[in-house]
Image (tube, rainbow, N blue to C red):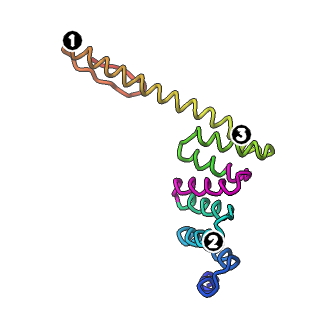
Amino acid sequence: ESITMYEKMASKNPTAEVLNVLVDAYMKEKLYDKAIMIYKKLIDMNPKKAAYYGSAAYAYGLKGDPDRQIEYYRLSLKLDPEDAEVYANLGAAYEKKGLYAEALKAYTASYELNPDATQVARKIPQMKIRIIQQKQKELGDEYLTKIKQVAADVAKKEGYAAVMDKGNENTLKI
């Protein structure tokens, strides 16, 4: 009922105050598409207000659109490059996408702006570990692919069939 009332008010007199109340109601009701539409109106009304971009990014994240979430956090930071919270949120968005190097950069920027942010401080070594793990996995996969190719070449040359078995461990059966 209150949403309907604010929608009517927003259609007659779309002030930032009315739109902010309406967008808060949409967010509480998990109507993220409608909230994003209102954030875009607020951005059109005041394109230099970083908080609107950050709020839109948050809504995109809740909607499950991490690419737009990252885009809007970055737009917010262009307007306010000193916002430690937005850097932390950007780091979380990158982390969710598995972009650990980018997450590390964002978390580091956040921590440099706000060294008291203990949760962000804990994320920095976590991202370093994830980057190492990701690299190890990539190298392991690359090594396994090379071994498979060599084994297949040797087996073919000798007249055998090579089969890679990924059971509990990687074994080669010829």
Q: Residues within 10 Å of mark 2 (few under 14, many from 20)?
A: many
Q: Is residue 89 left or right of residue 153?
A: right
Disc 1 to disc 3, C-alpha distance: 54 Å
Q: Which mark is residue 122?
A: 3
Q: Tell me which corner region of the image, top left, top right, bottom left or bottom right, holds residue 32.
A: bottom right
Q: Tell me which corner region of the image, top left, top right, bottom left or bottom right, holds residue 78.
A: bottom right
Q: Tell me which corner region of the image, top left, top right, bottom left or bottom right, holds residue 28.
A: bottom right
Task: Spot the residue most to the top.
Answer: 158
Magenta part of the chain: 64-88
Q: Considering the numbered disc 3 on the image, is that residue within a helix, a strand or a loop?
A: helix
Which one is in front, 95 or 56?
56
Residue appearing at x 53%, y 42% in the figure:
98
Residue appearing at x 64%, y 39% in the figure:
104
Q: Amino acid at mark 2?
A: Leu
Q: Is residue 165 left or right of residue 85?
A: left
Q: Which residue is mark 2?
A: 42
Q: Quadrant of the C terminus?
A: top left
Q: Considering the numbered disc 1 on the image, is that residue within a helix, a strand or a loop?
A: helix
**Picture coordinates of residue 100, whole percent (x, y):** 58, 39
Q: Amino acid at mark 3?
A: Arg
Mark 2 vs mark 1: which is more N-terminal? 2
